[in-house]
Image (spheres, rainbow, N blue to C red):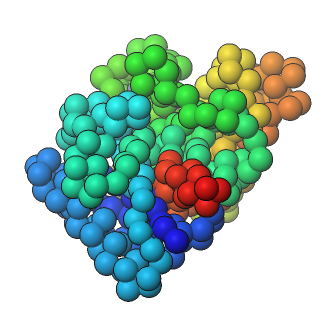
Amino acid sequence: MSYVIGLDVGGTTIKGGVFAGTSQSMIDIHMKTYSNENTLEEILASISEAVQYLMDEASHLEIGNLVAIGIGIPGFVKSSEGFVLYASNLRLHNVNLKQWVEEHFGVLCVVQGDARVGALAEREFGAAKGFSSLLFIVIGTGVGSGMILDGKIYEGAHSVAGEIGHTILEPGGEICACGRQGCLETMVSGPMLIRAYQRRIGKKVDVTAKTLAELAACGETNAKAVYTDAARSLAIAIANYCTILDPAIVVIGGGVSLAGSVLFEPLRAFFSVYASPLARQSIEIVPAVLGDRSGVIGASLLVRDILLDERSM
Ligand SMILES: [Zn+2]
């Protein structure tokens, strides 16, 4: 038998898993191994350490040979060549991660952006199971997204497609991390929801996105209004996306999506206002179900076909 490794390389942590079946993770790790101050060499050393650890554990379990490694990275990735074009959290620019991993471990490596990887996982085992096209939006500190069209991850001609978080909804609005103004991210990300709440109540208070959601769920007027505003912006962005690309389903994950009905109820209501008549009848907006496991699962799916091919031989 053989196995693959899935790695979810985040801004400060690496999560990983070993997959020997079509759906089962044999070993899970969660390593807090670097900070965003680290150099490229240190980050690569952490990736190497994580792979080595998983290989050692797999060898104790005698589950065969490692045949491939899938890696999800928070940034722009040109997957066909394995290039991380830009990952601001990791300070990676034009790094051929695929080549580096393949040289180090002697097995095939596939690298992809983390939101795209999350989309794969949700389609295979999560909220979009059975759908051939979907939009997956992750709302946390920032807003990422991944698109699967006709069963395949869509990267675009320059590998930067799907950045719904940086579609502009309010020209001249808040300055975004991308340098422009009024992007969706400035209206719905966790830190921006907290800022909007503080603006409404006119003072700085110690809240997190989680406590804000709890306040809204208890009916606190300002917190509810913050989610209603965010839901309106998100609904407009999703409606526009649906008008152009007509996905079968829209899945929303990330910390902000855990707010539940205080976000999803107004979101669906606004979507039915802004979406085209056909889209509003046929496209569902649902919460992700895999949580922070989607990165590791999706990364393994990047290379799982190699296992399936082996079995069919
Ligand atoms: Zn932006």
Quadrant of the snapshot with the C terminus: bottom right
Closer to the camera in the image, 201 or 282: 282
Whether residue 223 appears in this view of the structure is no
* Residue plotted at (33% across, 62% down): 14
Left or right of residue 281: residue 302: left
Q: Position of residue 183 (x, y in %)?
A: 45, 25
- Give the camera-side residue of 235 and 37: 37
Quadrant of the rendered image containing residue 106:
bottom left
Query: Is 308 located above or below residue 195 in the figure?
Result: below
> Which residue is depicted at the point 72% across and 18% down?
243
Q: How far across and down, in percent of the image, does residue 173 sit?
A: 42, 21
- Extreme residue toward the bottom, this view: 60
Residue 76, percent from left and from top: 36, 33
Point out residue 36 in the picture as x, y percentages from the top left corner.
19, 51
Does 272 appear above or below 304?
above
Total numbered labels: 0
- In the image, is 218 to the left or to the right of 305? right
Closer to us: 152 or 204? 152
Q: Which quadrant of the render holds ligand 1? A: top left
Q: Is residue 176 left or right of residue 200?
A: left
Q: Residue furthest front?
A: 313
Q: Quadrant of residue 85?
A: top left
Q: Is residue 244 visible?
A: yes
Return the residue nearer the eye: 100 or 224. Answer: 100
Q: In the figure, residue 310 lies in which quadrant?
A: bottom right
> Which residue is painted at 41% across and 34% down in the image?
79
Report the residue at 67% width, 52% height from top: 124
